[in-house]
Amino acid sequence: MAIDLLNIARQGVLASQSQLSVTSNNINNVNTLGYHRQVATQAATESQRLGNSFYGTGTYVSDVKRVYNEFAARELRIGQTSLSAAEASYLKMSELDQLYSQIGKMVPAGLNDVFANINSIADLPTDLGIRNGALSSMDQLAKTLNQMQSHLDNQTKQTNSQIESMTARINEISKELGNINLELMKTGGQDSQLLDKQDALIQELSQYSQVNVIPLDTGAKSIMLGGSVMLVSGEVSMSVGVTTGDPYPNEPRITATTGNQSLVIDPSKLGGQLGALFDFRSDTLVPASQELGQLALGIADAFNDMQSKGFDLNGNIGQNIFRDINDPLMSSGRVGEYSTNTGTAKLSVNIDDVGQLSGGGYELSFTAPATYELKDTQTGNITPLTLNPPGELVGGDGFTINIGSGAMADGDKFEIRPTSGAASGLTTVMTDPKGIAAAAPKITADAANSGEMDVKVNNINRTAAGFPTTGGELTVKIDSATNTFEVFDAAGTSIAGPSAFTPPQINTPFGFSFEIDDRSAAGVSDSFTFDLSFAEGDNSNAVAMAELADAKLMNGGTTTLTGVFENTKLDVGNKTKAAEVRVESADAIYQQAYNRVQSESGVNLDEEAANLMRFQQSYQASARIMTTAQQLFDTLISSVR
């Protein structure tokens, strides 16, 4: 049998034409996102034996494959997830940093304005114009904190909205991947265009969350979201969504749904933009809001407490300037009840000592029959609480948890945020500038006192007989071990008592009552001398009030009022800088992975141009063989005529 030279040439032409087609397609898709370079694999046809030798019979294109490296693609997805998380975190932190840098500067400025006005009152205690200016500055400070809290709430809403929009896009991708899997299962996973589209969708999905890809024998790919939730299984697509937050409704959770079953996803396992948004909300926004509430409580408590220690311009005990720290409008959101609780207990939180508050959150858990534990969510420290009648859980950091009604069941949990809601609820309740307590009573502790007891006058009646004034001071001896008190005149003669009292209130028969703060373990016997005379020019309490500017009242006596806000601002700034560094690091890793993928799967125009010339020459050479074969055939025919 003779060698079919014409057929060999024809196969060469067809093979070169296929190579040119693949090369041209690569060139045309050089800018197509997600496109993987394709190569045509040539193989020799079976040889034929002629005499004692074997001769080749031509070539053919055995396969057209996309250049794809699963390990490089996985590395790129991991790099994309890390980069997207870092970028999302940096973007949100930058927005918050600008909020604290631009609008936030009004908070310390407002505090400084308040203290400047208090200093002016100390200079001219009876000037109603100055007093009115002080009240106006306090009202403006409260509104500034309200506004700052409103901006933080808007940040939370915006973050929640971004989470919702991302889950909607994830669902769209899930459906598309399911449809692609179905088509790939029909073709055995050989359609390069579908595979490119599939990889592009998976790459986009890796922006939102960590993605695990499981290749199937059918040519399809199953996709796991966050390493724990199956999003696509073959042609079956699951969906994700958001549900009401638990225990706080304004902090939605993300869920995965299959049929009638729904599973709450742990956001810490998501990664990507979704994980970054959840981390930003829980680790930055919530603490910032709580610390702002801590500042609001500190301001209200400090000024209201100073008011209660002084006399206003009418000679009466000073009343609150700001809303009381335990007013319902100042305490909304202090307790979050988990939906899994089976008990009926309804809790509230009462602030006892603002100075002991940390600005953090806690988790209260109950184990039957009578174990109450409070866990600090920042430090992890667990504190056992004592239940005192009529339902007070004491032992917290400056606050008491009250069981208002119902009872706890075994395993019940509550989230406690003692400072939540305070910044939005802060407002001034004083309208009369005469109400600012610039003067102060003169209460002198006996030199022999223990130092473990303080007193504070809370009610006076200047018309009562024996009311203590200068020259007619009264000394009250208090025995907190027996809960009795005795009153002595200026000469040291007993004129009342010993009489019993119910701590902490002591009512004297001489037109004044006061509270005691006993810090002793077993009780002490201390004496205090009262001179409750009043002079309009007295500025002693205004001076003490002005000194609050530098007093370390917060965080266990380590931070000033302004310092609370500045610490939050500094923390936000540090986190923003750290986020910027993470973006640079993640981008370097991503670029390295991207370059590796491009070096293998990307289209190199120089390489494709060289291939174009090579296959063009091959095509021309094969066509020349056909011409030669035709000439030989014509010569052979002519020779036998």
Image (spheres, rainbow, N blue to C red):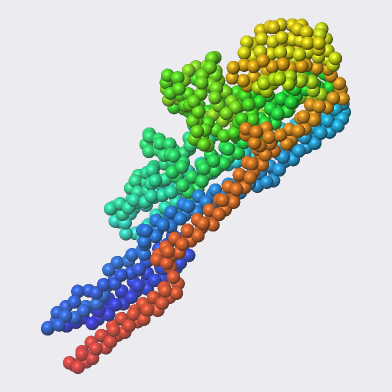
* Foreground pick, 466 / 94: 466
Residue 210 visible in the shown view: yes
Q: Residue drawn 30% across and 70% down?
A: 41
**Residue 2 locus on image (x, y percent):** 16, 83
The number of numbered badges drawn on the structure is 0
* Foreground pick, 146 / 516: 516
Q: Residue drawn 39% across and 56% down?
A: 74
Q: Residue drawn 33% across and 69% down?
A: 40
**Residue 516 locus on image (x, y percent):** 68, 17
**Residue 605 locus on image (x, y percent):** 45, 72
Vertical side of 444 occupied by 425: above or below: below
**Residue 365 locus on image (x, y percent):** 47, 26
Q: Quadrant of residue 330?
A: top right
Q: Quadrant of residue 137?
A: top right
Task: Say whether residue 9 is left or right of residue 112.
Answer: left
Task: Say whether residue 259 is left or right of residue 407.
Answer: left
* Foreground pick, 324 / 159: 324
Vertical side of 295 occupied by 68: above or below: below
Q: Residue drawn 28% across and 83% down?
A: 626
Name the quarter where the N terminus is drawn: bottom left
Task: Say whether residue 548 is left or right of residue 277.
Answer: right
Vertical side of 2 occupied by 27: above or below: above
Q: Residue furthest left?
A: 51
* Foreground pick, 113 / 88: 113
Q: Quadrant of residue 144?
A: top right
Residue 328 visible in the shown view: no
